[in-house]
Image: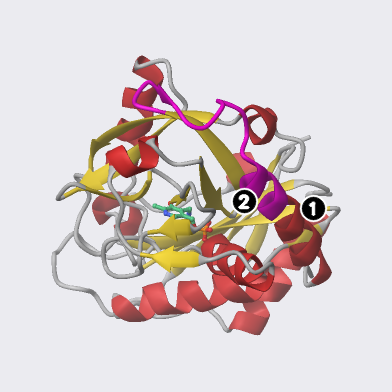
Amino acid sequence: MSRIVYVNGEYLPEAEAKISVFDRGFLMADAVYEVTSVIDGKILAFDGHAERLERSMSELDMKAPCTIDELEAIHREMVARNNLSEGLIYLQVTRGIADRDFVYPDVEPSLVLFTQSKNVVDSPMAKTGMKVISIPDIRWGRRDIKTVQLLAPSMGKMAAKAAGCDDAWLVEDGFVTEGTSNNAYIVTQDGTIVTRNLGHEILSGITRAAVLRYAAEAQIKIEERPFTIEEAQSAKEAFVTSASTFVWPVVEIDGKTIGDGKAGEIARRLREIYLEESLKTAI
Ligand code: PMP
């Protein structure tokens, strides 16, 4: 079955869904995006993603294509029209279509959404854990804005694959910022969760916020601060979070086994709690 894609007010079969070559998303990566998960036909953490989208657009002086209520209706319609039971919804807003110029044009933004059917709950990686390598973080300085400039993370994933691993952790000035498409965490030998503090250096993950809240409720100690690869390699556990993977354990960093090489207990517990709790507020 061909997917139904949303493009600027229209729901179209994917082969008919088109964007202009003059769209600034295509020409200049002048675009922001969000990815939400769907389980049992319900969208997880919609409000958080909608709020972050608004912030990304506002940081770039980009016009919003519609209201949050309209966006929610489009999301629901996409789930219905694509009969999506489990998977992802990808949303992209671009500044719009204009002749190529570095100056922002005063045009209407473009809005595109498509779905990806996928098993997000029963992913093998949740059980086996990921092997990661560390690489220099060569991305731009405003990683808190969720733009579609994804070549650096893409190169990072390719480097990980070439090394026989699953993903890469990015290192800047000696400290881990985040994963190529997720936030990175370690659990110290005394059971404290450590993850990079928010700032321009990392994306403020919607899953990160929820997982840290659930961890605090479960009386787990949290430190939001930078950590090194060496500290991570001697940690009890390591894991990542994102909207599409929830919580995935990390079992190897630069060839060094973490803990006993199996998915960690805290990562396993947080994944369970996250799935249970976020389904309660899914729409
Ligand atoms: N950091 C980066 C660089 C990402 O691409 C993502 C996933 N979009 C995340 C963190 C996790 O954010 P979220 O939990 O909102 O998906």
Callout 2 touching callout 1 (CB < 8 Å) = no
Reply yes or no: does residue 254 show up in magenta: yes
What x and y, as percent, mark residue 82? 78, 49
Give the residue at x 48% y 31%: 258
Give the residue at x 46% y 79%: 54
Foreground of the two, 192 or 270 = 192
What x and y, as percent, mark residue 281? 78, 72
**17 sits to left or right of 155:** right
Reply yes or no: does residue 152 show up in magenta: no
Q: Earlier in the sequence, mark 2 or mark 1?
A: 1
Q: What crowding class fits label 2: few (fewer than 14 Cα within 10 Å), some (14-19), or many (20 or more)?
A: many
Foreground of the two, 113 or 37 = 37
Judge depth for marks 2 and 1 and give the one in front. 1
Give the residue at x 37% y 35%: 233
Foreground of the two, 7 or 253 = 253
Color theme of the render: secondary structure
Quadrant housing the N terminus: top right
Q: What crowding class fits label 1: few (fewer than 14 Cα within 10 Å), some (14-19), or many (20 or more)?
A: many
**239 sits to left or right of 57:** right
Q: Tell me if the residue at label 2 has its CB under 8 Å from ligand 1.
A: no
What x and y, as percent, mark residue 262? 61, 28
Quadrant housing the C terminus: bottom right
Give the amino acid type for the residue marked by disc 2 in the picture: Phe
Q: Using the image, tell me which numbered label, if any, was put on residue 114.
A: 2
Q: CA distance from mark 2 to mark 1?
A: 16 Å
Give, as a single range, the part of the protein colored magenta: 253-271
Q: Using the image, tell me which numbered label, if any, was put on residue 245.
A: none
Please indicate, yes or no, whether residue 181 appears anywhere in the rendered image.
Answer: yes
Q: Using the image, tell me which numbered label, if any, was put on residue 39.
A: 1
Give the amino acid type for the residue marked by disc 1 in the picture: Ile
Per the image, label 1 sits on a secondary structure element best described as strand
